[in-house]
Amino acid sequence: MKIFNRYYTVYDFLLLLGDLVSAFLATAIVRAAYYLMNPTIAVDWLPWLGQGGVMAVLVLVSFYYSDLYVIDEALSPRELIVRLLNGFGIVCVMAGVVCFLFPALGLRDVYLSEVLLVGLNIFIWRLGCLHLLKIARSHGKILIVGARSIGKLVAEELCRQKHLGIEVVGFIGSEAGQMTLSYGNPTNILLPIFPRHSTLRVVEAKGVNKILIAESGGDFPAQELVKLRLKGVPFEDCHTFYERLMSKISIADLQQEWIALSEGFRRTHWILFSKRLVDMIVSAVGLILSAPLALLTAIAIKLDSRGPVFYRQDRTGQDERTFTLYKFRSMFQDAEAGTGPIWATENDPRVTRVGRIIRKLRIDEIPQMINVLKGEMSFVGPRPERPFFVSALKEKVPYYHLRFAVKPGITGWAQVCYPYGDSEEDAIEKLQYELYYVKHHSPIFDLQIIFETFKIIILGRGSR
C-alpha cells in the first residue's frame, strides 16, 4: 500500500493499530474499574477518552524513536524486551513533560495503574505478534522470469524479509540450473532455474500466484506468459517490485525505458513553488532560532584550533552547477593539503575535538541554511557532493547524473536510510535512494524525511 510516496505492508499497520488499541484500552479498563468501585460518582467518559488518545500518541512517538516499528522476524524476544523497556521509559518521561507543560490535558489524573496496564498490554501484544510472525506460513508464491541481477536482488530481499510471507519458487532461464542467493552472510540458499519452455508447468505445479519480469528478449517465454496473463496471473516488472519493497531504485540492469515510462519524476509548478516557499520560511526561522547556538559554536571553534570559523567548499548542485557550500569548520585548517580530496572516515584524524561534537549533533550544517535561503540548496534533497568526486562517479556509476535533477539538500532520503558513505560502493548504494527521492519528491515526502532526520539527530546515528 502506498501512502505519501512510501510503501507499507499490512504488518506495518498491524503493529501501529495494535499499539494504539493496547494503549487506549488500558485507559478504558482503568476508568471502568474506577467507576465500578465508586458507583456514586457521575460517569464522565469524555475527558478520559481524550487522555487515552494522548497516551496512545505518546506511545506511538516513543516507540517510533525506539525502533519498535522496524519489523524483523530475526528480532529476538530479548531484543524486543529491551526495546520495549526503552520505549516505555520514554513514554513515562514524555507523559511527565506533557503533564507539566499542558496541565489542561488532565494527565495529572492518570493513575499509575493505567500506566502500568498500558505497558503490560503492549508487552503481551508485542510478544504475541512476534510469535505470529515466526509461525506465519507463506501466503504468496513468486516466479521470476530471467536470471539477471535484479531478479536475484529481489529474491534475496524476499528471503531476508520472511515476515512478508512471500516465497520465491525459482527462476525462468534459457536452460535448467541453480541460482545461489546470499541474504545474510554466511546464509546461502539454492533456488532452481527452470528452462523457459516449462513456464506453464512450473506455474501450475508450484501454485505460483505472481510473476516478476527480470528480462526480455531471446530468453523471454512470450507465448507461455501470454497464456498465463489471460488466465489472470498478475505480472510485475522486477524493478518496480524492488522499488516498492526497498523504497529505492536499483540500478542493476536498469533500462532507460523503465525510467522514461514509469510513473513519477514529476516537476510540476506547484511542487516547485511549495518546496521553495517552505525552504525560504524554514531557513529564515531556523537561522534566527539557531543564532545563540551558532554563536557558542563559533566561539568554541576559535578556542579549539586555529583557522576560520566557517568552512567554504565548492559543491555540485542542481543541473551540475557549482556553488559554495557553507559549514562550521570541523577539521583542522588545510587538513587535505597533503592528501587532496578524500572520503570522510570513521574517527577521521582530520577532525578537531569540537568538530567531533558538532558533527555528531549536526551543528556544523547550520550555515547551510544560508545556501537554502539563497536558492542553491533545499532542506531535503540528495547530498551536495564535491566536483572532484562527481567527475569520478559519473564515469563509473550509471545514472549518477540523474541525482542533479533536483536541488541538493541538508538532509535527504539517502541520508536517513543509509549510513555515512566513505567509498564508491557507498555512493552507488546512496544513489539508489536518491533516485527514489527524485522520482517521488513532494512537500509531504519532504516532511517525512525531516521527521526521520530529527530521530537520527536525537539518537546520534550516522555522523562522521
Image: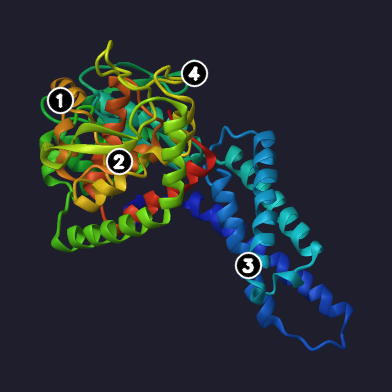
**SS class, disc 4:** loop
Q: Nearer the viewer, residue 150 or 81?
A: 81
Residue type at mark 1?
A: Lys
**Who's the residue at 50% across and 55% down the image?**
13
Q: Position of residue 377 (x, y in %)?
A: 23, 46
Camera-side residue: 194 or 350?
A: 350
- The vertical placement of 93 against 71, above or below, is below
Callout 3 crowding tier (Cα within 10 Å): few <14, some 14–19, many ≥20: few
Q: Nearer the viewer, mark 3 or mark 1?
A: 3
Badge 4 vs badge 1, beta-carbon distance below 8 Å: no
Q: Earlier in the sequence, mark 3 or mark 1?
A: 3
* Pointers 2 and 1 in contact (C-beta within 8 Å): no
Disc 4: which residue: 187
Q: Are marks 2 and 3 in contact (CB under 8 Å)?
A: no
Q: In this rendering, would 327 be left or right of 362?
A: left
The amino acid on which the numbered mark 3 sits, given as a three-letter code, is: Leu
Q: Pointer 1: residues within 10 angstroms few (<14), some, or many (20+)?
A: few
Determine contact: label 4, label 3, CB under 8 Å. Answer: no
Upstream in the sequence, badge 2 or badge 3? 3
Q: Is residue 24 visible?
A: no
Disc 3 to disc 1, how far (Cα)? 52 Å
Q: Is residue 48 left or right of residue 356?
A: right
The image quarter containing residue 174 is: top left
Q: Position of residue 397 (x, y in %)?
A: 19, 24
The picture places residue 123, in percent across and down from the top left corner, at: 71, 49
In front here: 145 or 26?
Answer: 26
What numbered label is drawn on residue 101? 3
Task: Please state which amino acid type lies under the numbered disc 2.
Answer: Glu
